[in-house]
Amino acid sequence: MFSGLWSWGGNRYGQLGDGTRVDRDLPIPIFPLSGATAICTEYNWGCALKADGTVWTWGQNMFSQLGDGTQNDRHMPAPIAGFGDVRLIATDSSTGYAVKSDGTVWTWGSNPVVPHVGVGPDIYNYRPRRIDGLSKVRAISVQSDVLFALRSDGSVWAWGNERTWGPGYNGLFTVEGVADDAAGVGASVPG
């Protein structure tokens, strides 16, 4: 019996990861995702982290959210080539994020904040790019184009745009007064 990940539902873009675009009413296994330690799913795509530190993506790729250098949909999970040593993943709509074991934060896909802090003014990040200014990160949480990062010193950093935070907050900044309560933010990276 398969003990990995299972999926069901709509499959217009191959987001179920079964190699087809056939909707499924009953759960089916997602191959080759045995050994996954984390999974994030969005409306039309998925992202998984395997125990070996590789990140696997599948489904819609209109905004390059699969991180494979294309905008071609993919109906089966595949690793993001040349990208490993990852300890934590998060997704938001059409953007992927990862924290590597060295505490650096990386992003790929849609670029809701122009210019993206540390990654340039491109509309899409076709492959994972490091976010300059974020290091020693042990946890992240993302929602509605806003990324929160908890650093090992207890400080919380936010990355968003003026639509979210108001004038003067377009980019990376520290969030004052929440470091003491930050232990529960997102998922943590061991170490």
Image (cartoon, rainbow, N blue to C red):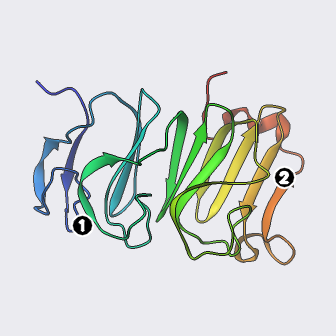
Query: Relative to residue 108, is residue 102 drawn left or right?
Result: right
> Residue at point 24% right, 31% down?
4
Q: Given the current orientation, which residue lies at the most extreme front position?
A: 82
Q: Is residue 152 above or below residue 89?
A: above
Looking at the image, is mark 1 or mark 2 earlier in the sequence? 1
Horizontal side, residue 75 vs residue 152: left or right = left
Residue 108 location (% of width, % of height): 53, 59
Point out which mark residue 141 bears: none
* Amino acid at circle 2: Val
Secondary-structure class at tag 1: loop
> What residue appears at the point 84 percent right and 40 percent down from the top-left corner?
155
Residue drawn 13% across the image and 43% down it: 28
Q: Please indicate whether residue 29 sits to the left or right of residue 39 in the image.
A: left
Reading the image, the residue beneath label 1 is: 13
> In x, y percent, where is residue 189?
61, 30
Q: Quadrant of the N terminus?
A: top left
Residue 188: x percent and y percent? 62, 32
Q: Position of residue 62 (x, y in %)?
A: 38, 73
What is the tally of numbered marks visible in this picture?
2
In the rendered view, would you say 75 is above or below 12? above
Q: Decide: marks 1, 2 in contact (CB < 8 A)?
A: no
Task: Locate residue 185 relative to residue 135 in the image: left or right.
Answer: left
Q: Which residue is mark 2?
A: 175
Using the rendered image of the protein, determine whether residue 109 is visible from the camera's viewpoint: yes
